[in-house]
């Protein structure tokens, strides 16, 4: 392992999940949070999550062995001192990130990689003035990265190719599925694809074509059944006897017609209030956290199934 030490800055859900990702892959992790209260709760929460992974046979070592690789550090410099990669997980505020990255650049060793988990801010917005800006990038995960392996790697115009290569190797070694975003774009890849689907779902809901529950069913029991193990390009390649070209010839006109008649969703409060009321009738607000834990256990079951299938194919 070329990189052995990881600093995780921010101990909320994403930071705790990243700590698990790296620790279960053999890395030493130091986690820091400006809030002592948040930091105090990090290790117990991580231990509980690792126990859940163990219950689905998703870890290869005892729970205590994995958790022992994670250390909570009240001092930022202590967390950063020997880091080979820093994974930042703080608020989506460009000024705050710029201030933190100035400190990361100052306190880390010169060859440490500085990665942000930001879901929408390009690295160029908070790294331009840094002496070590060539080692900075975005490494955008899916929540939670301990259960969903995708990580989007996107550099700024000044990020070096070597940085991107080293980052990809580290995340692969940590068991993630890195993809490279070739140049900066707001929202990166996943959020733009998710946004396109969400925009159409909200538009259809606003226009009264279906209830929120039925639109969720269309995704959950329709598109998502295939999309859980193949992407949209492979999907259409298999949906016509002659592959992509045949599919385009058969259905291209239909999709052009749909696109021409689309009504984009403009996020009006009235529609969102109606949607929220429908969701609260199904799931009271005080049950959201409980349902989130249920989601995570379902993701664990899916991961366990995928591992079983992969082992069987091997």
Image (tube, rainbow, N blue to C red):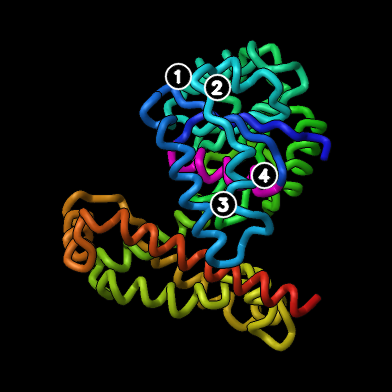
- The residue lying toward the viewer, choosing from 223 and 271, is 223
**Mark 4, residue position:** 181
Q: CA distance from mark 3 to mark 1?
A: 28 Å
Q: Which secondary structure is most common in the magenta stretch? A: helix
Comes first in the chain, label 1 or label 2? 1
Residue shown at 52%/72% (left/top)? 255
Residue shown at 54%/24% (left/top)? 125
Asked if residue 16 lies in the magenta stretch, the reply is: yes
The segment highlighted magenta reads: 12-25
| Left or right: 39, with 147 as reference point | left
Q: Which mark is residue 126?
A: 2
Q: Which mark is residue 115?
A: none
Comes first in the chain, label 3 or label 1? 1
- State the image quarter where residue 95 is shown: top left
Mark 2 lies on a secondary structure that is helix
**Mark 3, residue position:** 146
**Mark 1, residue position:** 95
Mark 1 lies on a secondary structure that is helix
């Amino acid at each position: 392992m070329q990189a052995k030490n990881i600093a995780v800055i921010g101990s909320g859900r994403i930071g705790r999940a990243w700590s698990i990702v790296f620790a279960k892959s053999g890395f030493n992790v130091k986690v820091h949070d400006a809030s002592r209260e948040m930091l105090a709760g990090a290790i117990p929460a991580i231990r509980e999550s690792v126990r859940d992974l163990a219950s689905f046979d998703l870890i290869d070592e005892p729970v205590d062995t994995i958790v022992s690789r994670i250390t909570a550090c009240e001092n930022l410099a202590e967390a950063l001192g020997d880091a080979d990669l820093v994974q930042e997980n703080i608020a989506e505020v460009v000024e705050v990130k710029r201030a933190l990255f100035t400190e990361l650049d100052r306190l880390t060793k010169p060859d440490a990689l500085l990665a942000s988990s930001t879901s929408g801010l390009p690295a160029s917005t908070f790294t331009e003035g840094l002496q070590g800006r060539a080692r900075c990038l975005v490494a955008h995960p899916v929540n939670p990265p301990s259960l969903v392996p995708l990580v989007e790697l996107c550099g700024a115009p000044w990020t070096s190719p070597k940085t991107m290569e080293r980052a990809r190797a580290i995340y692969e070694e940590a068991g993630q599925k890195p993809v490279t975003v070739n140049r900066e774009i707001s929202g990166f890849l996943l959020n733009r694809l998710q946004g396109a689907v969400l925009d159409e779902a909200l538009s259809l809901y606003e226009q009264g074509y279906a209830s929120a529950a039925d639109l969720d069913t269309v995704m959950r029991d329709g598109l998502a059944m295939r999309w859980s193990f193949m992407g949209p390009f492979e999907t259409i390649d298999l949906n016509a006897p002659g592959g992509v070209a045949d599919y385009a010839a058969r259905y291209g006109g239909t999709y052009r017609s749909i696109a021409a008649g689309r009504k984009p969703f403009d996020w009006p409060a009235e529609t969102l209030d109606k949607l929220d009321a429908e969701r609260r009738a199904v799931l009271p607000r005080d049950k959201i956290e409980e349902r989130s834990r249920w989601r995570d256990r379902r993701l664990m079951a899916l991961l366990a199934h995928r591992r079983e299938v992969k082992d069987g194919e091997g």
